[in-house]
Amino acid sequence: MKKITVDQVRNYKGAAEPFAALTAYDFTSAQILDAAGIPIILVGDSAANVIFGYTTTIPVTLEQMIMLSAAVSRGTQRAMVVADMPFMTYQAAVEDAVRTAGRFMKEAQVNAVKLEGGEMMAPQISAITRCGIPVVGHVGLTPQSYHQMSGYKIQGKTTEAALQILADAQAVESAGAFCIVLEGITAELAREITATLNIPTIGIAAGPHCDGQIQVFHDILGISPNFVPKHTHQYRQIGDDIRSGIQEYIREVAQRDFPGEEHSTHLDTGILAELANKKS
């Protein structure tokens, strides 16, 4: 089974049908998404929230992201695996960005990396791509800038802000990114950026006009119990099924209904007799 390539993703631009992408953070989830036909799996720094329990993406470390990305890579045969570069592993210097991207490629064996930021991050994107590493951009609401943005808010709602996000997206494309995530912007701005760029756009909380859409695995399946983002549709309530199954397990153990005869292995009667003799 051949991997989805950069050229194939580029060809999604302007296709009649938008494509779907999802996050994954472990081997088993990656296997499920791959078998379902998802073309792009993002090992998102949203792992900080859904895996490690932080309130923002900022605390997750490079070592943690490499570990999770490697697990997803091992569980994937066809889908392109893209790894999020975590906060402060690329912003300070171009050299940091290249080294971080290189570690993801070598140690986690991902197929591409993603970083947040527009014009300011163009030198990093350019340097990484010159090293032969594919880059996915990310503009609009950039979660690693949570504090600077005063929380998770829709971006680009004024003319000035919208023009800046458009300029950021164009800078990301010019720097060499092969596709770009548009997060937390108005549907109209996402449509304008999608029409302007020659690379595919992937939306999250950005309306229906992007070339593709991405969501968090846990959100669309109802696994996370306490929060449902506005931009998410829950296609299943797996969290309820999991809780129900665990409660049933607790009851069966308490009532000695589990494990049953079919779950048990028995000693030979001769060995049993020997044990009884030694005990006496």
Image (cartoon, rainbow, N blue to C red):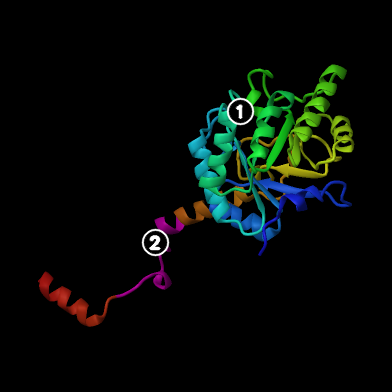
Task: Check if mark 1's residue and mark 2's residue have beta carbons within 8 Å.
Answer: no
Q: State the residue at coordinates (83%, 29%).
A: 186
Q: Looking at the image, can residue 110 be seen? A: yes
Identity of the residue drawn at 57% across and 50% down: 72
Q: Residue furthest bottom?
A: 270
Q: Amino acid at mark 1?
A: Val
Q: Position of residue 246 (x, y in %)?
A: 50, 52
Q: Residue at x 39, y 61 (%)?
A: 256
Which residue is the site of mark 1?
94
Side of 36 where 188 appears, left or right: right
- Of residues 174 and 229, the one nearer the viewer is 174
For marks 1 and 2, give the one nearer the viewer. Answer: 1
Query: What residue type is disc 2 on?
Result: Arg
Q: Position of residue 55 (x, y in %)?
A: 57, 28
Query: Would you place residue 143 above or below residue 228 in this image?
Result: above
Question: Where does the magenta region start and end?
Answer: 251-266
Q: Which mark is residue 256?
A: 2
Disc 1 from disc 2: Cα separation: 61 Å
User: Alpha-carbon neighbours of circle 1 within 10 Å: few (<14), some, or many (≥20)?
Assistant: some
Q: Of residues 133 and 147, which is closer to you in this image?
A: 133
Comparing 161 with 100, the one in front is: 100
Circle 2 sits in a helix, a strand or a loop, which is it? loop
